[in-house]
Amino acid sequence: MLKLCGFAVSNYYNKVKIALLEKGVPFEEEHVMVSQEPALLARSPMGKVPFLDLGGGRCLTESQVILEYLEEAYPAKPLYPRDPVDRARNRELIAHMELDLELPARKLYRAAFFGGVLSDETKQLVQKDIEKGVRAFMKIATFSPWVAGGEFSAA
């Protein structure tokens, strides 16, 4: 049985978990934190989560790679549109979410989750980056009713 390894606070972990649930793929969860311990590095070479343990000593890392694997290995309930342009647009939306929204927002995590202090300069830079990312995202997202159109998808 597949084993999703990571922790539920991670957007990337939840992205994979939602895909598994939507596809109806049976899986187990294993709470794993990021580390550089040899046992974790044997399963996730960068010590990152999430990763998907396929069994037999095989693991996949990187959430988008895991989604691509799930799409190919479990095609009965697709999470990407059939049309090549719509499929590419779906991946484009995912890239914008990850690179232009989530990545800049990470600079806020220490303050948001752990009581850290942010400089005014950092706040202004993050706000500028996120506003730019939102403007770009809004140009390609449809929200009709889902972010990428009429059907639930990976985006």
Image: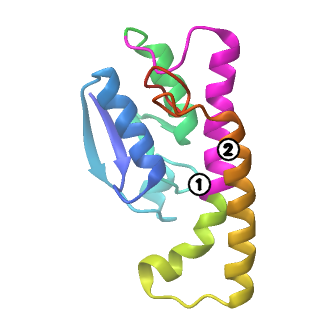
- Towards the viewer: 133 or 108: 133
Q: Taken as a whole, is the magenta stretch helix, strand or loop?
A: helix
Image quadrant in which the N terminus is located:
top left
Q: Which comes sooner in the sequence, label 1 or label 2?
A: 1
Q: Secondary structure at mark 2?
A: helix
- Residue under label 2, please give it: 137
Counting other residues with Cα less than 10 Å from the Cα at mark 2, is it few (<14), some (14-19), or many (20 or more)? many
Residue 28 image-quadrant placement: top left
Disc number for residue 141: none
Residue 22, given in percent of the width and then of the height, sits at: 33, 26
- The range drawn in magenta is 77-102
Q: Could you tell me how far apart the alpha carbons at marks 1 and 2 are, in whole angstroms?
A: 29 Å
Q: Secondary structure at mark 1?
A: loop
Number of marks present in the image shown: 2
Residue 153, given in percent of the width and then of the height, sits at: 48, 25
| Nearer mark to the viewer, of 1 and 2 | 2
Residue 120, given in percent of the width and then of the height, sits at: 69, 89
Counting other residues with Cα less than 10 Å from the Cα at mark 1, is it few (<14), some (14-19), or many (20 or more)? few
Residue 14, given in percent of the width and then of the height, sits at: 39, 46
Which residue is depicted at the point 43% across and 82% down?
Answer: 114
Which residue is depicted at the point 29% across and 30% down?
Answer: 21
**Does the rendering let one see residue 124?**
yes
- Is 99 included in the stretch rendered in magenta? yes
Contact check, label 1 and label 2, Cβ < 8 Å: no
- Is 98 included in the stretch rendered in magenta? yes
- As shown in the figure, which amino acid type bears the numbered disc 2? Phe
Q: Is residue 135 left or right of residue 20?
A: right
- Towards the viewer: 19 or 33: 19
- Residue under label 1, please give it: 46
